[in-house]
Amino acid sequence: MRVLIVEDESRIAKRVERMTRDILGNTLQSLTHINTLQEALTFIENNPLDLLLLDLNLNGEDGFELLTTAVSESFHTIVISAYKDQAILAFEYGVLDFVPKPFDRDRLEKAFNRRMRKEKLETQVKYLAVKQRQRIQLIPVDEVLYIKGAGTYTELFLSGGKKELHDKSLERLEQLLSPTFERIHKSYLVKISEVKGIIVNSGSKYMAELKNGAFIPVGRTRYKEIKAKWF
């Protein structure tokens, strides 16, 4: 795993680094510490990452400027901050976890384990950040009808027929989104409320018909569970 720590207090950064090495062990491929906002933005632009550990106050600079960029990337972000009142907003932007300062090793390990277990969040994400012409656009989750996996990327299909590309994989978005989205196929997540019905075609092939007229495949192994849950 490739990890970036963005923290302006050297003492805390060293503590996070020590705990990270201890928790991840041999799975840690690289660990970098940066203490300024601009350096972090440049590093993210030029280096592949799996996880960002981010403080929200960087020498008086607002870490949310970096957070908005980070959540549009392929990796997950864990915020480590003393500003507990910003936790809800951070979750709404799409962070994997918010670790309040002061913290211990167990709390940080819990945040790492959330990524490894691929469990869903209890706090609802309200936006998905996507890159648009050198800027970041926050897409309200309410506008997302379904999501299609496209290799390491995903395609967001939105109300009004719009479509956006997201850098996160389907698996990572599934972790962030609330249970209102269901994995109905290896390549599709769909908002449950948008499903009009399930169509059974010849050869035991299943399709979900959406309210907007779209049809998306339903995995054979998922059909019985989905039918029992929705209909």
Image: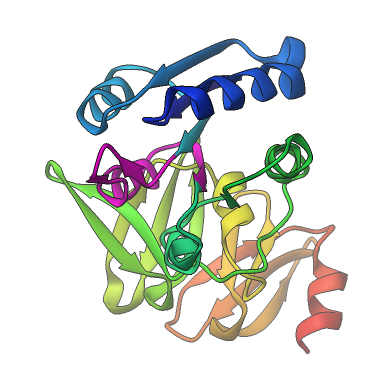
| In this rendering, position of residue 108 left or right of residue 98 | right
Q: Position of residue 132 (x, y in %)?
A: 18, 49
Is residue 69 within the magenta segment?
yes
- Residue 163 in the image: above or below residue 213: above
- What residue appears at the point 72 percent right and 39 percent down from the top-left corner? 104
Query: The N terminus is located in which quarter?
Result: top right
> Magenta segment, which residues?
55-80
Q: Is residue 152 visible?
A: no
- What residue appears at the point 40 percent right and 47 percent down from the top-left corner? 71
- Residue 97 in the image: above or below residue 203: above
Query: The C terminus is located in which quarter?
Result: bottom right
- Residue 112 in the image: above or below residue 15: below
Q: Position of residue 208 (x, y in %)?
A: 62, 74
Q: Looking at the image, which is closer to me, 89 or 84?
A: 84
* Total numbered circles: 0
Q: Is residue 208 visible?
A: yes
- What residue appears at the point 67 percent right and 49 percent down from the top-left corner? 186
Is residue 146 within the magenta segment?
no
Q: Looking at the image, which is closer to me, 129 or 228?
A: 129
| In this rendering, position of residue 223 left or right of residue 137 | right
Q: Position of residue 207 (x, y in %)?
A: 65, 69
| In this rendering, position of residue 121 left or right of residue 42 | right
Q: Position of residue 211 (x, y in %)?
A: 49, 86
- Using the rendered view, name the quadrant where residue 163 is placed: bottom left
